[in-house]
Amino acid sequence: MSDTTVGNEGKDSSVSIDTDDQTHDLPINDSSQEVESQEHAAPSADDAGKSDRADIDIDSLLDMSRRAIEEEVGALLGLEMTCGGIENKIVTKQDFFLNEVSGKQVIANLDLIGDIDTNGWFFMRLKDTIRVSGSLLMIPKGELEQAVNDGDFSLDYQDAYDEIVNIILGGYSSVFEEQYPKKIRFINRELTSVIPMKVDITSDRPMPDQSYYISGMKLTLGEEELGKIHMVLPAADFGLEPLSSQADTSSVSQREESANDMHENPSENRSHEGASGFSSDVLIISDSDKETQCIADVLRENGLSFTQLSYKENVKSFLPGNFRAVFLVMEQVDEQSFAMVIKIASACSLPLIATGSDWTRSKVIKAAKYGVNDILLMPAESSDINEKVQRNIVRMAA
């Protein structure tokens, strides 16, 4: 499944949350209710001009909201809560799900009403959602740890999380009603769950493919460091400059020059044309120059040319081309890397060799399921790399 929707049409609506070994269908309550502004949700401001403070930028408002969240949710839970390392930036939908979030996520789908009528999304990892909800329910530590490990987001946890989300949105509402030039209220419409690596970027679920302004924060509860939470807002609705597509439309000549710089002998390039003007035998997708160099050396020894792309480039636009195989270098064998596997496999049927240092049996099975043909444990000897090259490229062409 690419995402899971939690409806609010009736008491028997359900949410399906994947765990490692099973899927749980759980009832969930109706969360379509307005969030009233919290009395102490944000630092006070002078009444004069508080609705037309155009000199306050959105980053300042998001930081005020962060402090409101810390105070109000901390008071609700009876624990010190911090949202540190706030980072606000514009991203695409693809960048968000590929680079910003990992692990199963619970999403509060928001209606933003007032002078701006749009949608928003609040993301928290499933395991962190269970943990903060369990803290509100005062679940014993051992039982809570078991629930986190099992991904047990049952009805009681869902009700508790609804209450926490409403407090969070009350903080945002207070700040944006008082300080933003256009008054906005944040309303919790429904909860959904999603696995980032399964999101279809071209669909409107869980949100449309457009530019977003995200506010990411590192969550700490008591002395325990949890994952990141994200408030996601449509950039255009807040008058923020959408991302330029320049990164995906850079000239082919510049990319070819970068790729050719990696070759000791430019004559190694084949005469045939690959995708987007490339004339290489092998596509290497990697952000690690060290690991790439080891593979590149072996490819040269076999008379094979290559092109290197980073994870952030539009890989699909280069595939399948005239490449004979793809090497995917994983710094970590995690969901972000598997998302890239899915992207490659959906664009071509070329042999895909995935490299990484932390392979486990379950990860190997998952990799094969998503389209990997061969794996390589790194760091690897030249002989091991050569064996993969021979098996997946040289012998295939014989």
Image (cartoon, grey):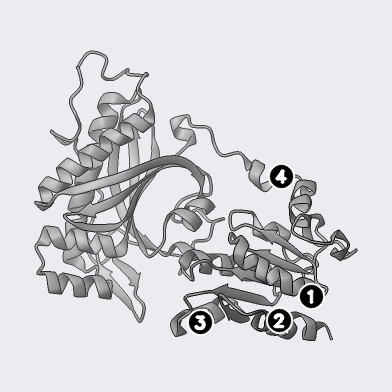
- What is the C-alpha distance between the residues marked 4 and 1? 31 Å
Location of residue 134 in the rendering, given as x and y in whole percent from the top left corner = 16, 63
> Disc 4 marks which amino acid?
Ser
Specify the quadrant that holds the N terminus. bottom left
Q: Where is mark 4, residue-wise?
A: 250
Badge 3 element = helix
Front residue of this view, candidates 16 and 380: 380
Q: Where is mark 2, residue-wise?
A: 386
Tell me the number on the disc at residue 301.
1
Label pair 3/2, CB-CB below 8 angstroms: no
At horizontal 45% and vertical 34% (from top left) the residue drawn is 237
Badge 1 element = helix
> Disc 2 marks which amino acid?
Asn
Q: Where is mark 3, residue-wise?
A: 364
> Disc 3 marks which amino acid?
Val
- What is the C-alpha distance between the residues marked 3 and 2? 20 Å
Q: Is residue 341 above or below residue 116?
A: below
At horizontal 73% and vertical 74% (from top left) the residue drawn is 298
Label pair 4/1, CB-CB below 8 angstroms: no
Tell me the number on the disc at residue 377.
none
Location of residue 97 in the rendering, given as x and y in whole percent from the top left corner = 47, 56
